[in-house]
Image (cartoon, rainbow, N blue to C red):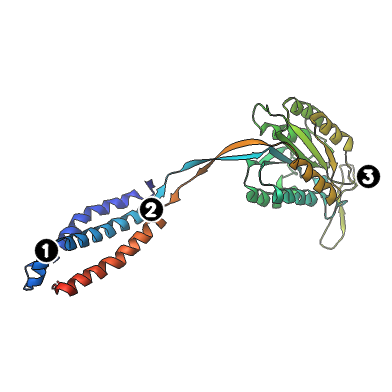
């Protein structure tokens, strides 16, 4: 146990003065005219001692509460049967395509949120990417926090107007996700990447090379292709329900198509599966597939910080503050002790 404000213990220096003052009060009463009180002090001195101890205890408890006692941080070991899963989410501008209602990125976010609502045993991590990948959450069981992070994702989560941050660096995102499992992955099948993307990598490391590296480490990659196979013109719908198209440097309208060949290759190389996420039935099948994978015991340590102990002292203080005056009043009434 430790204290957040230990300087309040200096108030304990006043405790002897409190005890001397109380003893003086009872001493004056003892030298008074009431013989019953003198008789009581001789035969039952414990009553006076009990009152002194009670009032001293109340004083000490008040100081303890002012010092704010806390239980020092401690570690709790948790064991769960699950696998480690890192979701890799494409938030490049091509994910704004509306060939899937309402658009690709919102569909991907809904998929992740639905998965977290069902999942209870696996550790989940998150990586987002456009021209560069970024880890947004390490492997964790905090599904509520993960859901809040996912809700806040948009194509603006990465400032793609800055040089080097636009595009689709799918290969680099896969490598970053693989690094989250640690330096060596020995348990094949217990480490998994689920990538949600439109699959058109156009910058950085070739995703096929990344897939081969992950396969050597025993990391499985499942790829969910978000979008229609035929592709679509890249546009968004503004508040006036008008289409606003995206153009390249030459003034041509950009298209957002699905590179299924590349995504299927990544899945085949790593022993995973490729899914076309065009409908909810596909997502249900993905969830069932993940649940069927062999789990392994995962041991984690959860650190609990500064658990307050105030609630432990309040009941004791309440009993004493209420009981001591009642007991003292009973003594005074019973033996007619003069009140000084």
Neighbour class for label 3 at 10 Å: few (<14), some, many (≥20)?
few
Residue at 68% x, 26% y is 186
**Residue 79 appearing in the image:** yes
Q: Nearer the viewer, residue 221 or 8?
A: 221
Nearer the observer: mark 2 or 1; the answer is 1
Do the residues bearing badges 2 and 1 touch, measured as CB atoms within 8 Å?
no
Query: Left or right of 121: which side holds 212?
Result: right
* Cα separation between marks 2 and 3: 65 Å
Numbered marks: total: 3
Q: Sequence-wise, which precedes: disc 2 or disc 3?
A: 2
Neighbour class for label 1 at 10 Å: few (<14), some, many (≥20)?
few
* Cα separation between marks 2 and 1: 41 Å
Q: Residue furthest top?
A: 216
* Cα separation between marks 1 and 3: 102 Å
Kindly indicate the quadrant of the structure image that contains residue 196: top right
Write down the residue under mark 2.
Answer: 68
Neighbour class for label 2 at 10 Å: few (<14), some, many (≥20)?
some
Nearer the observer: mark 2 or 3; the answer is 2
x and y percentages locating residue 139 in the rendered image = 64, 39
Write down the residue under mark 3.
Answer: 230
x and y percentages locating residue 75 in the rendered image = 49, 40
- Helix or strand or loop: what does disc 3 sit on? loop
Nearer the observer: mark 1 or 3; the answer is 1
Q: Sequence-wise, which precedes: disc 2 or disc 1?
A: 1
x and y percentages locating residue 67 in the rendered image = 35, 52
* Picture layout, residue 168 above or below residue 154: above
Q: Sequence-wise, which precedes: disc 1 or disc 3?
A: 1
Write down the residue under mark 1.
Answer: 43
- Helix or strand or loop: what does disc 2 sit on? loop
Query: Left or right of 305: which side holds 146?
Result: right
* Picture layout, residue 337 above or below residue 183: below
């Amino acid at each position: 146990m430790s204290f957040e404000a230990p300087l309040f213990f200096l108030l304990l220096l006043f405790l002897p003065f409190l005890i001397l003052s109380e003893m003086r009060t009872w001493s004056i009463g003892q030298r008074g005219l009431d013989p019953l009180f003198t008789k009581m002090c001789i035969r039952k001195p414990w009553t006076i001692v009990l009152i002194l101890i009670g009032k001293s205890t109340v004083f000490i408890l008040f100081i303890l509460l002012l010092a704010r006692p806390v239980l020092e941080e401690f570690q709790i070991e948790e064991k769960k049967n699950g696998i480690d899963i890192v979701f890799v989410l494409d938030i490049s501008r091509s994910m704004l395509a509306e060939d899937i209602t309402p658009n690709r990125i919102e569909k991907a976010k809904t998929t992740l949120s639905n998965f977290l609502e069902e999942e209870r045993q696996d550790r989940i991590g998150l990586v987002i990417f456009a021209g560069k990948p970024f880890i947004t959450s390490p492997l964790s069981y905090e599904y509520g926090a993960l859901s809040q992070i996912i809700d806040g994702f948009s194509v603006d989560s990465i400032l793609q107007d800055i040089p080097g941050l636009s595009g689709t660096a799918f290969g680099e995102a896969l490598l970053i996700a693989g690094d989250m499992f640690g330096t060596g992955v020995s348990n094949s099948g217990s480490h998994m990447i689920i990538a949600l993307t439109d699959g058109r990598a156009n910058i950085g490391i070739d995703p096929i090379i990344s897939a081969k590296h992950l396969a050597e480490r025993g990391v499985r990659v499942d790829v969910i292709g978000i979008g229609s196979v035929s592709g679509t013109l890249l546009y968004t719908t503004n508040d006036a329900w008008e289409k606003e198209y995206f153009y390249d440097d030459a003034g041509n309208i950009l298209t957002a198509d699905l590179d299924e060949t590349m995504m299927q290759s990544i899945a085949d190389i790593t022993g995973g599966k490729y899914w076309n996420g065009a409908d909810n039935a596909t997502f249900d099948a993905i969830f069932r597939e993940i649940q069927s994978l062999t789990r392994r015991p995962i041991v984690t340590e959860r650190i609990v910080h500064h658990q307050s102990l105030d609630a432990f002292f309040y009941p004791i203080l309440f009993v004493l503050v209420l009981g001591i005056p009642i007991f003292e009043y009973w003594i005074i009434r019973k033996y007619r002790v003069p009140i000084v």
